[in-house]
Amino acid sequence: MGLLNGNGYDTILILGYLGLPIHICQLLISAHHYASSNQQPGTLRNATVSIASVLADVSMQLVINMSDLRLPDSGHDFLRYCRFERQLSPRTLEAYGADLLRFHTWLQAQNMRLEVFDAAACGDFLQYCAQEGLAVSSRNRCLSALRAYVRFLHLERQLPGDPLQQVRSAKARRRLPEVLSPTEVEALLAHPPPGPEQLRDRLILELLYALGGRASELAGLGLDHLRDGGRLVVLRGKGNKDRMVPLGEAARQCCRRYLEELRPQLQRDPRQTALLLTRRGNAMRRQGIWRVVQTAAALAGLRQRVYPHLLRHSFATHLLQGGADLRAVQELLGHANLSTTERYTHVDATRLRDIHRQCHPRA
């Protein structure tokens, strides 16, 4: 593939954007520099190229050409810092890149230099984001990226100060999560998209509800994440934190059938360890998981908007309705703060109020 021709460092940085472990990226960088400094065109260089080629092949669909982001050098330096020093996830890097692109586009339109950007100008920028239709949560994330960016430039002595220290995020109104009823969930699980990959698609639906996982967590599942004969599954969540979630009997049987009957047909490369594979033998991406859920919802005749995270909301709400302990649900969901999990108690309280209003004679 010639990945290390020219500027091999930038190519390996791209591998970092794919979410490869930091020690793997550092190993590639060290090996490439050693081979270059010693002018060894033989074994070591070939080995480095081979390793990079294998890693790139695994994630070829996710390759990001950093030059496509029309950012100044400082923007690319910041994204590299976020990946290697802060070890942010690829999805966060993608969002930060889009935020920086929006910011620098606005700066150019205002004919403003970054050196004179201050808290008042930041308010103008956030107002512009609101006019563009960004939700409060998206504007807060944009502000978070901007604060980190300005702080990074200040530490790198590219800016004289950090003018955004006192800028506060807007308070977002917390909406109650939408949920499916148990009957609606059963209808969804009973309608996987027809076709040769139906076993896999049924497994995707079962896992989303049985584990309460995010679409990105499901896409990241490998065979080694199945533990104790498939009774436990390791999910890697935000901040690369792992959590262990039990897998129920129905989902376990579905997983067993998929592993025995379909996955061997989909697997083209014996080195491929992803659990969920496409018809080409690649690891499924979250976009593919979205399509499976939306197709199943249409087949089931569900009228509301159905998406993977809706099954996560339903998983948590149904556990609490069944009497599960709040902290146990927090652990299963991988929430850092209990307050994030508590919103599901409000969903259950709303349901109870509706029942009370309908059934109590003095309601």
Image (tube, helix red, strand yellow):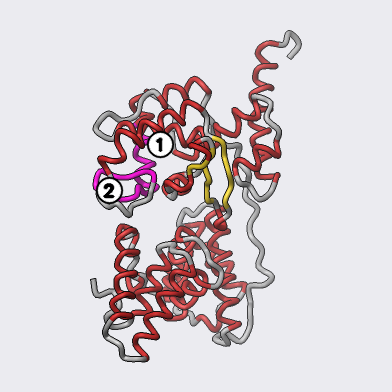
Magenta stretch bounds:
275-295
Disc sitting over residue 281 in the figure: 2
Rendered image quadrant of residue 2: bottom left
Residue 286 magenta: yes
First of labels 1, 2 by sequence position: 1
The residue carrying mark 1 is 204
Q: Which residue lies furthest to the right in this view?
A: 362
Is disc 1 surrounded by few (<14), some (14 to 19) or many (20+) residues within 10 Å? many
Q: Is mark 2 on a helix, strand or loop?
A: loop
Query: What amino acid does circle 1 point to?
Result: Ile
Query: What amino acid does circle 2 point to?
Result: Gly
Disc sitting over residue 137 in the figure: none
Left or right placement of residue 84 versus residue 362 in this view: left
Residue 268 magenta: no
Q: In this view, does 190 lie above or below 107?
A: above
Query: x and y percent of residue 21 in the render?
Result: 47, 64
Query: x and y percent of residue 350 in the render?
Result: 66, 27
